[in-house]
Amino acid sequence: MNKHHPDTSRLRLRRCIAAAALGITLTAALPAQAEPVQLNIPAQPLASALSALGSQANLQIIYGQDTVKGIRSHGVSGTMEPEEALRRLLEGTNIQYELDGNNVTLTSAGNDAALEMEAATIVGQAYSSASPMDGYVAKRASVGSKTDAALIETPTSVSVVTRDQIEAQQPKTVAQALRYTPGVNAELAGPQFVTDQLTIRGFQMGTGRMLRDGTRTFLPDFLGWDAPEPYGLERIEVLRGASSVLYGVSDPGGQINLVSKRPTTTPLHEVQLQAGNLDYKQGAFDLSDALDEEGIWSYRVTGVFREGDAQTDHITNRRQYIAPAISFRPSNDTEFTVLAEYQKQTGNFANPLPASGTVFRDPRGRLDRDTYVGDTRYDHMTNEKTSLGYVFEHRFDDIWTVRQNLRYSYYRQDSSELAVLSPHFLDPSQYMRYFDQREGDGRLFTVDTQAQADFATWDIQHTALVGFDYNNGKFDQQQALDIVAEPFDIFRPVYGQPLTFLPFSTADYEQKLSQTGVYAQDQMKIDNWVFVLGGRYDWTSDQRDDRTPQTQKDEKFSGRAGVVYLFENGLAPYASYSESFLPTIGNTPDGSQLDPTIGKQYEVGLKYEPNDYNAMYTIAAFDLTRENLVEFLPLGGVRQDGEVRSKGIELEARAEVLQGLNLIGSYTWNDVEVTESNTGTEGNTPFRVPEHMASLWADYLVQGGALEGLRIGGGARYVGSTYGDSANSFKVDSYTVVDALVSYQLGRLDSSLDGVEVALNASNLFDEEYVAGCFSNMGCQYGQQRTVFGTVTYNW
């Protein structure tokens, strides 16, 4: 053991106390890594420099936040022993260290109780973008690079919704969890619990194209009725902008990566009960621990049962969710984690309403938010999802690391629903409806294999990545679409009556999708400069067997380039260019195959990571164009002349302003315009895309006194006006809603209640009635009414 302090025994004791307070076990440390390693750590805040040292030298570093607060390091570069690098980073400070194997403990000189009195921070090998973390300010993420990269060094816009934020705000869908994220219109279809519908930078993104632990879900539209369970997530990472160089087929607006909860080697036991208005009830549990004394084997199992009424009459949503996982970590260099998941969702989609009576006042009045246009005699929906996979990582040496993520998923859907079609041709005051019946299933296999090399050439530190991924899916569906003969009076609905169905269309088809991609990326550090270059080549195949069988194959190269400069005061300006592509099946009138739609984005921005408190601020300006959009011609056929341009500015602030006081703020200006079209929409704005959005959330946990353990919080969300159809024939008003939180740790009152917390959450506290968005004059959906629910959580 190497020492650099006056009193070894006291520091050992403080270190054990800190480890116990954090709930970590520092066992099975590797032998001290005395051999020299190549390092390139620019001058920067000491906390960031320590994080870089831990990553590059395979060290785990523990320190109190006040120990490094406001201190900058001089930086180190070259080949040297890790301890020598640590000495140089701490040079001129009043900080002592103890090095034991690969574990480092830092304390301020003369402050023997430092780690006992303050919250400790761990950086280095034990911290990654998939690890649990405290607070709302994430400093690392994988979605922007496929490596465990610091956000300050990533030349693109990335937001992270942490586990602590999810627990505080208690979202029931991924869309709700993204309410306070810039660039994301999270609830454009109102309160839906069977699917997530949202836009990123003006482009729609469905659940079927989200990532799970870095791998694609890759669902076709008809099986996209999937709503991942946020209680089963460790974090949600949002990459805004084109990203095919990392993930292949993708929407131009960005990517959402859902990071699963993983086993911990320390005891984690949580049970939770919730109840609220709309007859809402939920029970949940989250259990994790080591299975042996060495922590080589560990497990986690997470489960949810939820039942509650939708704000739309006659719809009750039920969810059963369970996610077991087991990890094998024979050393700090190797991890193999098996992740399984089963989810069953029953209920129904809250079908849209006409603009007359929602956006506009109908002569007969205004439609209530709970208006139901279906019929319980015919409506039902069941979605089931089962998945099994693993994440594997092994570090061979100081240079080479390999990873592989693999997942097999099975989806099943059975649904039928009645929805409004148009005003009735005999009586325009009443409506025609259609009856949509679907039954389908799908199987999806995905695998992503990567090799990462960390090395130096002269004064350039490289993090090079090469990889191969493969996705293969087979999906089957049977669908029948009928017109309902009887007129429907939406203001005075009558349910349970016999209906006459007039067959309109049927479909019975099979779809096979596959994607193969190879990619390479290099993140280069030269003094304070960070450069990122990447390229990828994809081969895709889409085969559909129905009344008109089609097979389409595409191949496409995607590129990316970016640069960041790291100033010593924490500022980091950056610029980047990136591309995306999305295959389109079909043919033009001359018989030629449709080309993929492509996205091209230019972005510049500024990130700021202060030296003296825990925060991250970002401002980004972007110009994103989507080309080769398919347009349906009035006399039949299609053309690929469409183009949409999205440009804007996004601001985000995430900060722990004071101890216990958290702040999240965002603002979005997004100007989206159809720049090329042959259908008369040139110059228009796509529907359900606001020009302005803003949000602010703050909460405070009282640190002492009679109210210690009390947390109060609240937020406000503003979404600007949107157009209600592609012709821009009408507008939907803007809206502002307020959310609130109050919680209390009962253990502050009585030690026998340690671990028990009660909370009360309210969404849309003042019960603002508003239309969330429309896609036509028959397609408008109300926003979420006021919801209030209480939570009792017990941790032990």
Image: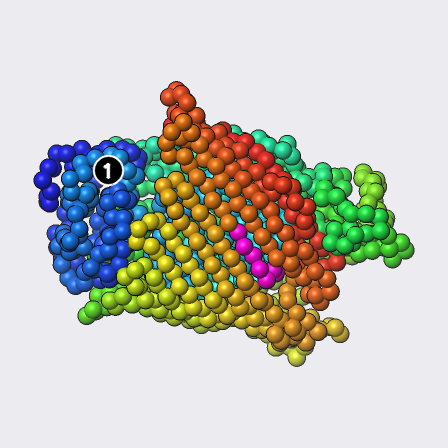
Give the camera-side residue of 44 and 484. 44
For residue 422, which quarter of the picture? bottom right
Judged left or right of residue 592, residue 254 is left
Give the camera-side residue of 322 and 110. 110
Residue at 63% x, 41% y: name it. Answer: 766
Residue at 39% x, 37% y: name it. Answer: 300
Residue 746 in the image: x percent, y percent? 43, 25
Whether 605 is drawn above or below 72: the answer is below
Q: Look at the image and give the residue range highlighted in magenta.
A: 689-695
Disc 1 crowd, CA 10 A, few/some/many (<14, 14-19, 20+): many
Whether 746 is drawn above or below 554: the answer is above
Instruction: Identify the residue under disc 1.
Output: 115
For residue 24, which quarter of the picture? top left
Q: Look at the image and say whether residue 278 sits in the magenta stretch.
A: no
Way the structure is coloured: rainbow
Judged left or right of residue 564, residue 578 is right
Q: Look at the image and say whether residue 691 sits in the magenta stretch.
A: yes
Give the camera-side residue of 324 and 132. 132
Furthest toward the right, the residue is 426
Residue 148 in the image: x percent, y percent? 34, 55
- Residue 83 appears in the rendering: yes
Whether 528 is drawn above or below 747: the answer is below
Residue at 40% x, 30% y: name it. Answer: 708
Q: Quadrant of the C terminus?
A: top left
Residue 250 in the image: x percent, y percent? 50, 62
Residue at 54% x, 71% y: name it. Answer: 625
Amino acid at pointer 1? Leu
Judged left or right of residue 447, residue 491 is right
Residue 311 in the image: x percent, y percent? 67, 40
